[in-house]
Image (cartoon, rainbow, N blue to C red):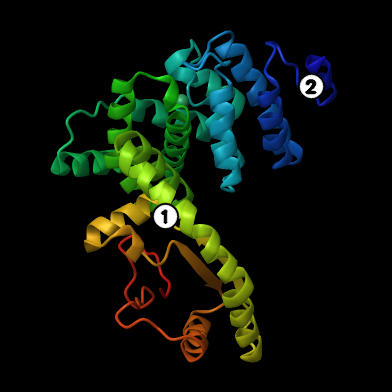
Amino acid sequence: KEKEIYKEKGINLIVMKTRETSTKVDKLLSLFEGEDKKLIKEAIEFIEERHGEQRRASGEPYINHPIEVALILAEMGLDRDTVIAGLLHDLLEDTETTYEEIKERFGKDVADIVEGVTKLGRFQFKNLEEQKAENYRKLLLATARDLRVILVKLADRLHNMLTLGYLSKEKQIRIAKETLEIYVPIANRLGVWSIKTQLEDLCFMYLYPSEYERVKRFVGDSKKELEEYLKRVFIPKLKEALKEASIEAHITYRPKHLYGIWQKTIRKGIRLEDVHDILGVRVIVNTVQECYLVLGVVHSNFTPVPGRFDDYISLPKPNLYQSLH
Ligand code: MN
């Protein structure tokens, strides 16, 4: 039946897939239009045919993996070629497919990205001392002349970390260590925040399970209360004050990720109970000047905590991140 449904959508499924795969494919295709959508459909058919009956360690059809990788990339807003490279990224390594074939069907950019990702996969990282890890990171960045190679590799690693539970304990630890020492700093350097934080929390869970549970429990207990306060008191008050100052702003809030909270207790030598920013409020405005205006509004409406202010606009972080904290 699903084969029929897909035929109507213009995709010929060769191997029967799980319902989960269908949902992901729908989501992926909904993010593209016209020629791009058509080419992505072709790429899905292509990997279906090539990966065939291959399966993941979890037992699910192999193509679930590249589809998830492509979806991560598409949701980050990356271009069609990167998304197609995400779909094709394991073909050179795991099937008989050649570089030339990919180039002919999907263009040189896609073929080059897939080849780059394949090369990165061949580096072996073991016993990483800090100095060596730094060298590997440099090597990776230098090898990938096209940054899209790194982005595909990061999405690949994220999905592998999300499905790490199916591997042996030994492999879990090896891969989580490698991720924390090599891929997290690269994601940080490139400013791919969503991948960086997800990778960190997954590594945290596998490498320091008891600490992970402790932080998770702590956040679970205090988050609700704080969220209530932000929603009912802080944000409405801030909105009002900004409106009065005629500043157009977009206000959101997000929980600090678990690894970030844990690191903070270590870095500052404090207890979990003393971490006060487990929920951060974010005010996005149109100009740099307005950032400072917002700061003025905040300080005149709320009492700042002495010594807890950072100006990353005049002193950007090494990855060029700029904002006022
Ligand atoms: Mn992969």
Residue annotated with mark 2: 6
Q: Is residue 61 above or below residue 25?
A: above
Point out residue 320 in the picture as x, y percentages from the top left corner: 37, 64
Q: Is residue 304 above or below residue 147?
A: below
Say which mark, if any, is on residue 123: none
- Observer able to see residue 275: yes
Q: Indicate the amino acid at tag 2.
A: Tyr
Q: Secondary structure at mark 2?
A: helix
The answer to whether residue 175 is left or right of residue 56 is left
Q: Quadrant of the N terminus?
A: top right
Point out residue 177 in the picture as x, y percentages from the top left corner: 28, 35
Q: Indicate the amino acid at tag 1.
A: Gly
Q: Earlier in the sequence, mark 1 or mark 2?
A: 2
Circle 2 crowding by C-alpha within 10 Å: few under 14, some 14–19, many from 20 = some
Residue annotated with mark 1: 191
The answer to whether residue 314 is left or right of residue 82 is left
What residue is rendered at 75% in x and 41% in y?
33
Along the viewing direction, whichever of 56 and 34 lies nearer the viewer: 56
Residue extending farthest top: 53
- Observer able to see residue 253: no
